[in-house]
Amino acid sequence: SLDGLSVFRNTGLERVKPLEEDIEFMVKEYNLQRPEVGKPGLDYADEIRRLGKEESIPEFMCHYYNFYFAHTAGGRMIGKQMSALLLDKKTLEFYKWDGDLNEIKDKVKNDIEEMVAEWSRDEKDRCVEETASAFRGGGAVNSYLSGGQSPH
């Protein structure tokens, strides 16, 4: 049931508010027009919502894990490089965390492992089999954001 996912709400990994602040900063600072959400983002959001509606928890958790842990690993390094190149070394809010990020990641990772320990072999397989879809969805968004230049 979806109730089992409640432990993954308000973990400290959420990036909506910081991302919103960064978009507002860039719109004002660089006199940009705020873009609409592109088709890849809308399509990927629809896919995630579909998994939730169908209560496809293993598949959903694959996307959750790949999304959040990508932002806390390589995403931070990329953000630092882009900040140095494009933003006069300003650290965007997206890359700031309330609390110790390693502690937050450890808690979420432990919560995931506790959930997965209860899964059947079939559920574990379904989660693993969803990996390509998670990379496709995230890759399509990244490619869109980079003007179609992403190797994903």
Image (spheres, helix red, strand yellow):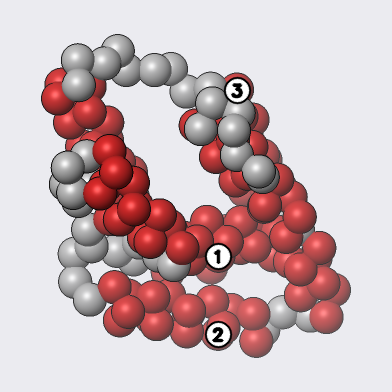
* Element carrying mark 3: helix
Residue 94 in picture, x, y percent from top left: 28, 49
Q: Which amino acid, mark 2?
A: Glu
Tag of residue 39: 3
Furthest residue toward front: 85
Q: Position of residue 90 (x, y in %)?
A: 16, 47
Question: Which residue is at 26% across, 16% downward?
Answer: 32
Which residue is labeled 2 in the image? 114
Q: Is residue 9 visible?
A: no
Which mark is first along the chain, 2 or 3? Answer: 3
- State how far apart marks 2 and 1 are (Cα): 14 Å
The local secondary structure at tag 1 comes to helix
Q: What type is the residue that disc 1 sits on?
A: Tyr
Q: Is residue 130 left or right of residue 134?
A: right
Distance of mark 3 from mark 2, alpha carbons?
A: 35 Å
Report the amino acid beneath label 3. Lys
Please tell me which residue is depicted at 19% across the width and 71% down the height of the picture: 99
Q: Answer few, some or many: residues within 10 Å of disc 3's Cα (few below 14, many 20 plus, some between 14 and 19).
A: few
Instruction: Give how far across and how far down residue 47 sits, in percent.
Output: 67, 39
Query: Which residue was labeled with disc 1?
Result: 65
| Quadrant in which residue 35 is drawn | top left
Which label's residue is closer to the chain start, 2 or 1?
A: 1
For discs 2 and 1, the disc positioned in front in the rendered view: 1
Report whether residue 120 is seen: yes
In the displayed structure image, the side of residue 8 where residue 10 appears, left or right: left
Determine contact: label 3, label 2, CB under 8 Å: no
Residue 7 sits above or below residue 151 on the image: below
Report the mark closest to the observer, 3 or 2: 3
Identify which residue, 136 or 7, lies in the foreground: 136
Q: Would you identify the image quadrant in which residue 113 lies?
A: bottom right
Instruction: Please give the name of the residue rendered at 48% of the width and 79% of the height, measured from the top-left corner.
Output: 109
Horizontally, residue 13 falls left or right of residue 146, namely: left
